[in-house]
Image (tube, rainbow, N blue to C red):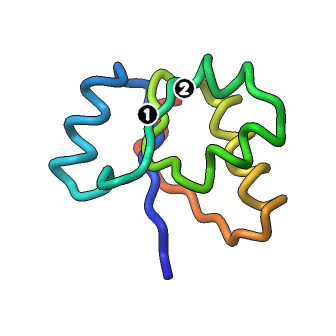
Amino acid sequence: GIKVRMVTGDNVLTAKSIAKECGILTTGSAVEGPDFRKMTPDEQKELLKTLQVMARCSPQDKLILVRRLKEMGEVVAVTGDGTN
């Protein structure tokens, strides 16, 4: 199936609220980019099993997220408004 994750520069509380309203955040987890960035690659991969929202993230965080998912054998597609 398809797993949708929300990756945004917004505040984590705002991001979680919008993600819940859209049905993206259900039983999974949310993290802020700086916290994700501090994790080891193995810790990131473990988190990605449940991650549904990443807030306050930088373009570099998005790149790391995509790389980790691909390392886990996932097919990844990215779309967005292009602001960061």
Residue 50 in picture, x, y percent from top left: 52, 52
Are there few (<14), some (14-19), or many (20+) residues within 10 Å of tag 1?
A: many
Residue closest to the eye, 79 or 24 = 24
Question: Which amino acid does the dot numbered 2 rest on?
Answer: Cys
Residue farthest to the left?
21
Q: Quick check: 37 above or below 16?
A: above
- Report the residue at 42% width, 50% height from top: 28
Q: Quick check: 40 above or below 80?
A: above
Q: Quick check: 1 above or below 31?
A: below
- Report the residue at 22% width, 47% height from top: 20
Residue farthest to the bottom?
1
Residue closest to the eye, 4 or 79 = 4
Q: Label 2 to label 1, Cα distance in Å?
A: 6 Å
Question: Which amino acid does the dot numbered 1 rest on?
Answer: Thr
Secondary structure state at the residue bearing disc 2: loop
Q: Which residue is mark 2?
A: 57
In the displayed structure image, the side of residue 31 where residue 25 appears, left or right: left
In the displayed structure image, the side of residue 76 where residue 43 appears, left or right: right
Are there few (<14), some (14-19), or many (20+) residues within 10 Å of tag 2?
A: many
Residue 41 in picture, x, y percent from top left: 83, 38
Q: Which residue is mark 1?
A: 8
Q: Are marks 2 and 1 in contact (CB under 8 Å)?
A: yes
- Report the residue at 71% width, 24% height from top: 37
Secondary structure state at the residue bearing disc 1: loop
- Report the residue at 44% width, 42% height from top: 29
In the displayed structure image, the side of residue 25 where residue 7 appears, left or right: right
Q: Quadrant of residue 38?
A: top right
